[in-house]
Image (cartoon, coloured by chain):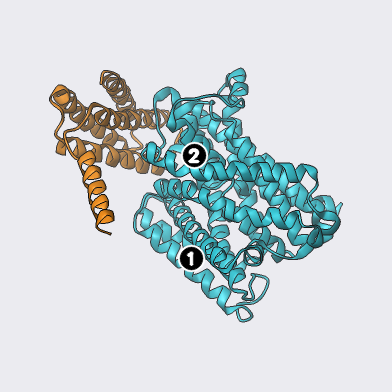
Amino acid sequence: MRLLVAAALAATAVFLTACGGPMRPDELGRSVDTLTSSAAEGRLIAVDVARARTKDTFARVRARELGETVDHEAEKLTDATPRPEIASQKQEAIDLAERISEALGQIQTAPQDRAGAAQAAHTLGVLSERTDELSKGL
Amino acid sequence: VRFFLQIALGVIAAIGGFVDIGDLVFNAQAGATFGYSALWAVPVGVLGIIIFAEMSGRIVAISKKPNFQLVRERYSDSLATVTLVASLVLTVLTLGAELGGLGFLLNYFFDVSVSFFILVGFIVVAAAAYFLPFGGIERIFGYMGLALVVYLAASIKLDPQWSQIGNGFIPEVHDSALYWYFVVGLIAAALMPYEIYFYSSGAVEEQWDERDLRVNRANAIVGFGLGGIIAVSILVASAQVLLPHGISPDSIGTVALVGQVPYGEIGLILALVGMLFAVGGATIDTAFSAAYNLAQHQGWKWGKRLGWRDEPNFSLSLAGFALIGLMLAETGIDPISLTEYAVIFSIPVLPLTYLPILLVGGDKRVMGKHVNGPISKVLGWGYFGLICVLAVAAPILFVATNGGG
């Protein structure tokens, strides 16, 4: 019985150790991939808002959901302590997340504003390309 | 003419009713992540559900025994109880995911709150289940679910590389655990156990007998087969729209967007309506399946065809499971994650669900001249072997891929 308890404690310790520690490049990469995906999807929505070929409520709700995903990712990145070799990439990811969130906010706030959506689509396109490059460099 | 009309109506309902939130999630994610290369897994899963649905419908038509009555008769008490508990947990998890999906889908139309629309969706499907006759439920949700054909039109309009799609139907060796996670998920999404519980109990509700064997065969083969084409087209269209942009579907809204890109607002609305009815129908199927299983295991009188006064235990358990599903959905848990858990962890339950069907379907004393023929036998036991392998592989792949992420 004691052996079993000891084994369970050891397994728990190993599990917790694996969960903690500084952020690794692959973990940062997964976060950045989420940003790429959110920005790219936001761009597709913004393009259709600009061409008046979507439903306002859908564009607004989906932009809000994407914005929440991006904000959550930015919070996780801010809280994480990165390994020294990826500290600058982590900071860049946070900056990109803030800009993606802002562009998504434009669609959420004014899904009828076609000119604003065209601008947001351009911005999100540039940002998704940048996050993609960042991810590939990790 | 009436006979062919009956077959045609059943087949159409089966096509529209084949897709549920599990198919939507796994097909879109697989297409967005691996393009067409996991396509082959869809027909593997669809053939499996055709085989077991046809067999279970035939068993009901001949012996009048639904799935969980077979479980009770063929298993020891303890194994039958384990099967019951596992199936109830997974069916209620799926029910929670479907209700959560309904909340998201309705909110895309009206933008109030997901939580509010989970409640609205619950009330609407509960009213449909209460007021509509059994066949009416199946057909209304099945017919409206046909709006999902927009994905087939989308995948053709987006000018696909047909040769690459053809290659996708050939299994390939892959060293990525994530690829195999999706393969297992695609097969499992087509073989969800609640589909068989509902199909066999539904056959009892509709009082099938030997004359309905042709209807059963047509529903299973043509209905599920063509339903599988919708599942394939969701994967193909997702590969065309999402993969080139690096978009990973994290919401049912992303799946709807796939319909919008080629067809604009009308494509979006068709996708949302199709998903709404497909998920709404699956919500009713899962709630009924849980109540059917418990009632059949306990030996209670059961069925929508009887009034609630005639089978109070069944009605109470149906209401209870529906409320548990509602509470689960209202916790705010992400329906996509819940779906992934429900699909992957349903796989270990599959052998327990399908073994009694194989045993009874092959039992000449019960089935007489309608016993499984050589093709049914070979395919049935072959698939049983496959799902046993998947039952072991699924939890391992789930851990290895960090839940597909």
* Element type where label 1 sits in the image: helix
Q: Splitting the image into 4 quarters, where does residue A71 fall? A: top left
Question: What residue type is disc 2 on?
Answer: Phe
Q: Residue at 42%, 30% (x, y): give it.
A: A48
Precedes in sequence: disc 2 or disc 1 = 2
Of B47 and B359, nearer the camera is: B359
Instruction: Judge left or right: residue A25 versus residue B299.
Output: left
Colour of the chain lettered A: orange
Mark 2 residue crowding within 10 angstroms, few (<14) / some (14–19) / many (20+)? many
Question: What residue type is disc 1 on?
Answer: Ala
Residue B43 spot, x, y in % from top left: 63, 36
**Residue that carries the numbered disc 1 in the rendered image:** B322
Q: Splitting the image into 4 quarters, where does residue A66 fall? A: top left
Q: Residue at 68%, 49% (x, y): give it.
A: B52
Colour of the chain lettered B: cyan
Q: Given the image, what chain letter belongs to the residue carrying mark 1?
A: B
* Element type where label 2 sits in the image: helix
Q: Given the image, what chain letter belongs to the residue carrying mark 2?
A: B
Of A115 and B273, nearer the camera is: B273
